[in-house]
Amino acid sequence: MKNWLSLFLFLLPALAHGVEIKPLYLSPDGTTLERNGAQVRVKDSGISTAKIADSAVTRVKISGLTSPTVQSFFSGSGTYTKPAGVVWLRVYGVGGGGGGAGSGSSGAGSGGNGTATTFGSSFLTGNGGTGGVTNSSWGGAGGTATNSGGLAFGRTLQGAYGSAPGGLGSTYTHGGNGGSSLFGPGSIGSGSTNTSNAGPITSGSYGGGGGGAGGYAAGVFAGAGGGAGGGFDVIIPNPASSYSYSVGQSGSGGTAGVSGFTGQAGLSGAIYVEEFYQ
């Protein structure tokens, strides 16, 4: 910027008095502009081969960089240990999903509740979803989530409720779908057009709720879907050397009642830890 300002001030008198501006000549070494014997020094700020070799990005410098790594946990509990050189983390996880309820004209069982996923002592928690109930107008509630450590920023998200069955006590009733978690949809509730597809359908993402079982005759009550586990997705800018963790378990599917079917179990929790290096 200073070089262009100097050039402008150099030409200003001529511009102000309407004087013809004669050609400028650049010296062979590219360092000086000349007009009518007057000279302006041009700062040498270009990139040269020598400068590139001396201080620019080189293959050696690029090869010294460490790509991000990921550790994932899908069951159990233990201790996460930060690798050497890691300067910040992204941690995201969900609690276990609640199970879908069973179906039947009587005696069908509710889905089991999922359990919590935690990272760090009283730090990040994704609570488990609630199991669905047979012949209910509501699905199981989604689990809540908390960031209690004050050492991370990001988001927490309550799991979605499971859905109610397609009808209450009516013929050929579809089971309710499991709730969706931070990681994706829950299991699909089972169909009900005949006995061959009235059982549970296995699908869904980590933390999703289980689908309810369908009914295939009048008076056979279908089950509601289970709620999804709560989730968290945060950045830890100055991580500790280690954190305890526990992955939430899924809730079981509700038992079959008279002339009914078993509900779909929820989906287990999970934790992903992305590690970023200096």
Image (spheres, rainbow, N blue to C red):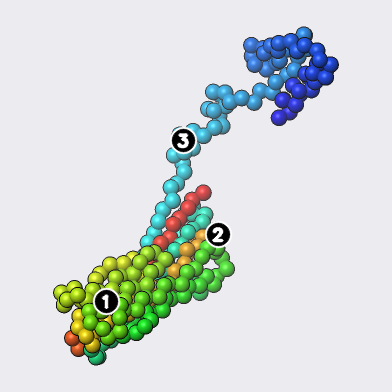
User: At label 2, which amino acid type do we have?
Assistant: Asn
Question: Mark 3 to mark 1: distance in Å?
Answer: 62 Å
Q: Secondary structure at mark 1?
A: loop
Callouts 3 and 1 close, C-beta under 8 Å: no
Q: Give the residue drawn at x 16%, y 77%.
A: 195
The residue beneath circle 3 is 60
Q: Is residue 205 above or below residue 47?
A: below
Q: Secondary structure at mark 3?
A: helix
Neighbourhood count class around disc 1 (C-alpha, 10 Å): few under 14, some 14–19, many 20 upward: many
User: At label 1, which amino acid type do we have?
Assistant: His
Q: Is residue 248 visible?
A: no
Foreground: 89 or 22? 22
Q: Give the residue drawn at x 45%, y 46%.
A: 66
- x%, y% of residue 259? 18, 86
Q: Give the residue drawn at x 44%, y 39%.
A: 63
The mark nearer the N terminus, 3 or 1, is: 3
User: At label 3, which amino acid type do we have?
Assistant: Val
Q: Is residue 238 left or right of residue 2?
A: left
Question: Mark 3 to mark 2: distance in Å?
Answer: 28 Å
Residue 9, quarter of picture: top right
Q: Give the residue drawn at x 42%, y 72%.
A: 159
Q: Is residue 120 left or right of residue 226?
A: right
Q: Is residue 60 left or right of residue 210?
A: right
**Label for residue 158?**
none
**Label for residue 174?**
1
Question: Mark 1 to mark 2: distance in Å?
Answer: 49 Å
